[in-house]
Image: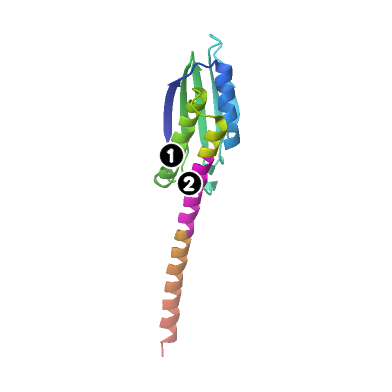
Amino acid sequence: MIIEHTFVTTLDPDDAFAGADQYLGPLGFERPMEGIDTSSPDHGFREWTRGKDNPAKAKVPTQLPQRLRMDFDRGRVTMAYAVTFTHPAKAAKHLKASALALCAGVEQLLTGARSCDELITEVRELEEELDRRARKSKTVAAVLLGAFVAIIVGGVIIAVLSLP
């Protein structure tokens, strides 16, 4: 899943990237790469990643491989947020709200609409709820599978015991 979000800020590039770092760092994002467009001091980009390297190893949606790129061009900020899934239909419903909240949070922070701590708390609560739902659905599936296996085994035992 890829989400793109564009907005305008009056901050200079260094302040915009520092603000994004301040917001995304506590949410588990790390910066593996950064780039500067040498043609102008007003251009540049940053990338952040979080999650497992292999989507199959993710136990909850927030552990899926995620990459967020922020491009800055003379006050215009373009964000691209990508998530890698093993089962897109399952995970997309869980992470779409989180992805939109992350992108909107960067915009609200860089436009001065809301404080960093408030936005971090909001996204953490949303992601904790998404992870809780994902764990709950896995637990329900495991219980149903266990019940099905128990019924089959019980039927086999009854059939064996009723033989003359």
Task: Give the quadrant of the C terminus.
Answer: bottom left
Q: Is 74 in the magenta?
A: no
Q: Which mark is residue 130?
A: 2
Residue 31: name its quadrant: top right
Decide which of 46, 150 is in the foreground and name it.
46
Q: Which mark is residue 97?
A: 1
Q: Is residue 40 left or right of residue 140?
A: right
Amino acid on which disc 1 is placed:
Ala
User: Colour scheme in the image?
Assistant: rainbow
Local packing at callout 2 (Cα closer than 10 Å; few below 14, some 14-19, many 20+) is many
Element type at mark 2: helix
Label 1 – label 2 distance at C-alpha: 9 Å
Q: Nearer the viewer, residue 59 or 130?
A: 130
Indicate whether residue 127 is drawn in magenta.
yes
* Residue 126 in the image: above or below residue 161: above
Report helix, strand or loop for mark 1.
Answer: helix
Kindly check if marks 1 and 2 are in contact, taking CB atoms under 8 A apart as contact: yes
Ranked by sequence position, the earlier of labels 1 and 2 is 1
Q: Amino acid at mark 2?
A: Leu
Residue 141 lies, in percent from the top left, at 45, 59
How far across and down, in percent of the image, does residue 53 sit? 56, 40
**Whole-percent x and y of residue 95?**
45, 41
Q: Residue at x 59, y 27 (%)?
A: 21
* Magenta region: 123-139
Name the residue at 57% across, 25% down: 19
**In which quadrant of the rendered view does residue 154 lie?**
bottom left
Prevalent SS, magenta region:
helix
